[in-house]
Image: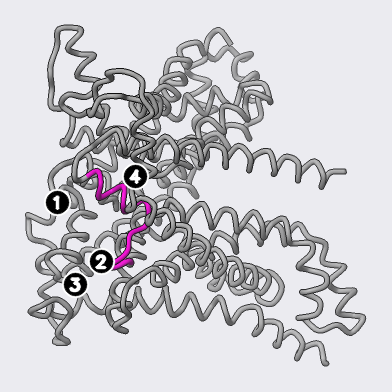
């Protein structure tokens, strides 16, 4: 391995590059001064100001509403679609259609929906974002559930049908219980994607509401303060915890499946 | 119930809700955008349904072509830098002991799961006039430089946002390689470099192509990063599209720009699968 020693330079450069901005962001959130750039001393005051900011509180609530709504839509429709595609058709076109929202650039989907909502004269708001997030989240749920389906044992479903159960009963009593871990994973993915999504929400939310990423975006345009850093630090903590817990849960799930 | 009737009922029950949703909220909107490229703009936004080729002739105006050129250049440089940084990283991760492999991979992906706007914001803090990098340079007796609001800052922001998307497919491709191939090459007297050039690199071309595509696609159509770090309003195609739809309210021309964006990406996808098949 001595010969590949020079590889260590870009390797460590990657990690420094990925984490240095995050460290700076968090350190600056504890700044007692007004500046987001120059550190003057330790203080928690920006976290206090954060808690009192109504715009941010509304943004958090809106983001959670959108994420919850679109996750429900995406999980129900995505699961059904995955079962339909895996068990009831061999169409490559339908496969491609189901995957399309995940591959399409977000800006293109955002423009399409803006034009469509304008055409049917829908008043924009949280529900138009829920419908929009449902489109791409559904593609991810369907993809995750399908991987689970392709590993599932089809003989149980066949046995159920041979014994006279219709497709709906077979689905409820046999397929669905087998799919539960996949559905939960898909729903978590849909929820996380919606929480962070900016571009599609920006185009389809209209002028009266804001999700948290949009609140942050417009705050930054008015100038940077340590308050944004404090918000950033909290969001970093939330998503890092979620990823690590998610990682642990998949591991536990895998080891259970192996038992 | 007869089996074929059961199958048809099943297909209907499972497929129709999701497909209806996709047709109404994905296909119809895309067809609308496509058809808007042929119409004229209304005086106060919206469209007038009179067919015109004007939107396409405006596309080849040198002004807009140069924006497309800049977008290609910025996305291309970002992809190249991501490859230069990502390949050695993925290569080393693939050789770590199993336990450290997971840690290293999670550490690459972790920033990707945090809020996109926050990640871009971090670079404003670092690059801004009184920001940290300039303070560091000042301590060395240099600067201050205007690091923010230029194409370099855009490339840095894009690289930061999409580097994980380069590392993951590269890692998957390198991990799959049989280490015996490299050993054989070394045993036959090849230097480390020629083993890399003749064995490792050719066998990981599909991973390289996937990674490049994963970085190029979101970079090329981006409007948030050029707006936050690039200063100027119409540096990249994404900025133009955003302006046409939300400010200039010229939806037909905005649609034509969107179509151009998709066209570039489709050409790239075709080129990618062509190269992948030959490799």
Mark pair 4, 1: CA separation: 19 Å
Q: Which mark is residue B117?
A: 4
Q: Earlier in the sequence, mark 4 or mark 1?
A: 4
Against B161, residue A135 (above or below) is below
Q: Could you tell me which residue is drawn at 54 percent across and 22 percent down? A: B92
Mark pair 2, 4: CA separation: 19 Å
Against A255, residue B49 (above or below) is below
Closer mark to the observer between disc 2 and disc 4 = 2
In this rendering, position of residue A94 left or right of residue A165: left
Q: Which residue is mark 1?
A: B234
- SS for tag 1? loop
Against A22, residue A259 (above or below) is below
Q: Could you tell me which residue is drawn at 20 percent across and 50 percent down? A: B236
Q: Could you tell me which residue is drawn at 81 percent across and 87 percent down? A: B3
Q: Which residue is mark 3?
A: B251
Of residues A22 and B214, which is closer to you in this image?
A22
């Amino acid at each position: 391995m001595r010969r590949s020693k020079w590889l260590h330079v870009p390797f460590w450069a990657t990690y420094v590059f990925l984490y240095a901005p995050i460290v700076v962001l968090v350190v600056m959130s504890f700044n007692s001064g007004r500046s987001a750039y120059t550190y003057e001393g330790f203080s928690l005051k920006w976290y206090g100001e954060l808690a009192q900011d109504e715009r941010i509180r509304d943004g958090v609530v809106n983001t959670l509403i959108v994420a919850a709504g679109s996750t429900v839509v995406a999980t129900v429709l995505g699961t059904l679609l995955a079962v339909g595609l895996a068990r009831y058709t061999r169409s490559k076109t339908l496969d491609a259609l189901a995957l399309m929202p995940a591959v399409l650039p977000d800006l293109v989907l955002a423009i399409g929906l803006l034009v469509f909502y304008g055409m049917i004269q829908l008043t924009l708001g949280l529900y138009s974002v829920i419908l929009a997030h449902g489109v791409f989240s559904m593609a991810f749920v369907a993809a995750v559930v399908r991987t689970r389906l392709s590993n599932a044992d089809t003989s149980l479903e066949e046995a159920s049908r041979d014994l006279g159960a219709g497709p709906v009963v077979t689905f409820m009593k046999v397929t669905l219980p087998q799919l539960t871990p996949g559905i939960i994973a898909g729903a978590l993915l849909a929820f996380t994607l919606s929480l962070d999504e900016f571009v599609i929400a920006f185009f389809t939310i209209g002028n009266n509401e804001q999700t948290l990423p949009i609140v942050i975006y417009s705050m930054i345009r008015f100038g940077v303060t340590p308050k944004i850093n404090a918000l950033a630090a909290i969001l970093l903590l939330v998503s890092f915890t979620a990823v690590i817990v998610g990682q642990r849960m998949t591991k536990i799930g895998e080891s259970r499946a192996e038992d | 119930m007869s089996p074929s009737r059961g199958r048809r009922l099943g297909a209907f029950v499972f497929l129709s809700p999701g497909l209806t949703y996709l047709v109404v909220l994905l296909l119809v909107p895309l067809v609308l955008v496509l058809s808007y490229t042929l119409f004229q703009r209304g005086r106060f936004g919206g469209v007038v349904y009179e067919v015109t080729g004007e939107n396409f002739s405006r596309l080849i105006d040198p002004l807009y072509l140069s924006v497309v050129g800049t977008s290609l250049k910025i996305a291309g440089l970002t992809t190249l830098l991501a490859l230069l940084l990502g390949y050695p990283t993925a290569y080393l991760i693939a050789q770590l002991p199993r336990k450290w492999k997971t840690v290293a991979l999670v550490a690459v992906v972790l920033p990707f799961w945090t809020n996109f706007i926050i990640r871009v914001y971090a670079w404003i803090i670092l690059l801004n006039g009184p920001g940290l990098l300039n303070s560091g340079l000042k301590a060395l007796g240099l600067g201050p430089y205007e690091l923010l609001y230029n194409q370099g800052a855009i490339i840095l922001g894009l690289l930061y946002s999409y580097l994980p998307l380069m590392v993951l497919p590269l890692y998957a491709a390198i991990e799959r390689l049989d280490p015996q191939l490299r050993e054989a090459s070394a045993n036959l007297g090849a230097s480390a470099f020629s083993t890399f050039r003749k064995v490792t690199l050719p066998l990981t071309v599909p991973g390289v192509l996937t990674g490049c595509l994963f970085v190029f696609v979101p970079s090329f159509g981006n409007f948030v990063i050029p707006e936050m770090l690039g200063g100027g309003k119409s540096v990249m195609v994404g900025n133009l599209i955003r302006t046409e739809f939300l400010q200039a309210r010229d939806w037909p021309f905005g649609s034509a720009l969107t179509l151009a964006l998709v066209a570039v990406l489709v050409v790239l996808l075709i080129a990618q699968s062509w190269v992948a098949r030959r490799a």
